[in-house]
Image: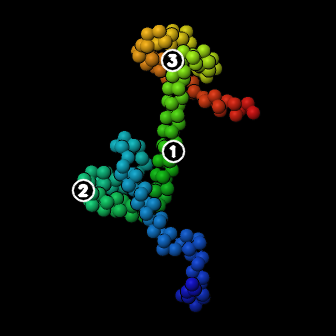
Amino acid sequence: MRRRKSDGAVEDETNDFTQGRGRSAKKRAAHAVEEFAAQLVGLRESEVTRLPLSDDLRREVDLARRTIGNSSRKRQIKYLAGLLRRYDEERVALETFIAGQHASQKGEREAFHRLEQLRDQLCAAETFESALVELERELPDLDLKKVSELAKTFHKLDDRKAFREIFQLLRKASEAGVVEDPEDDEDDDA
């Protein structure tokens, strides 16, 4: 479809849709900002305090968090989304900050699961020896003798305390040095 510009020139309206300047694209963008506002309101208090928010936005996020009624809360989220659209640079900074937070949490979660996996390998009699070799390579600061004794105690007595202590030792050693996934090491060798 064609339309006339104010200066008399004819402009092809299909360009607006392909470049994302149409009404639907604007609605999608507004809806995305509204979803982001709802995500901000849904964060835990400790996460909200770390956010780089201006006073206006912080006040509105707090107000939306305190709002109890469903309709009232939706209205507050829509108002917060409007503010976020107005403060575009701050919204982009917030999105970047939250994405970085999620990435670091994902890394911590993966490291935690890796430690659990190592502990489970130690506590299984059939994978005990190979787990010790892995630990010696991945965590050189770890007291292997102590871990070995605890794992053998778990094998004999099924002692849950030893199971927990192994994890505590692994976590301490991993805080001193980062636990690496052995699959990553294979990629480095290639």
| Residue identifier under label 2 | 69
Quadrant location of the C terminus in the rendered image: top right
Q: Quadrant of residue 15?
A: bottom right
Q: CA distance from mark 2 to mark 3?
A: 50 Å
Residue 2 picture location, percent across and down: 57, 86
Considering every residue shown, the one lying at the far front of the view is 126
Q: CA distance from mark 2 to mark 1?
A: 32 Å
* C-alpha distance separating marks 3 and 1: 35 Å
Inspect the image, locate mark 3, and give the three-letter code of the amino acid beneath it.
Answer: Cys
Of 72 and 47, the residue lying toward us: 72
Marks 3 and 1: CB-CB under 8 Å? no
Residue underneath mark 1: 100
Query: In this rendering, does residue 164 appear at all?
Result: yes
Q: Which amino acid, mark 2? A: Gly
Q: Are dots 2 and 3 in contact, CB under 8 Å?
A: no
Against 181, is 44 above or below? below
Whole-percent x, y for residue 119 in the image: 51, 21
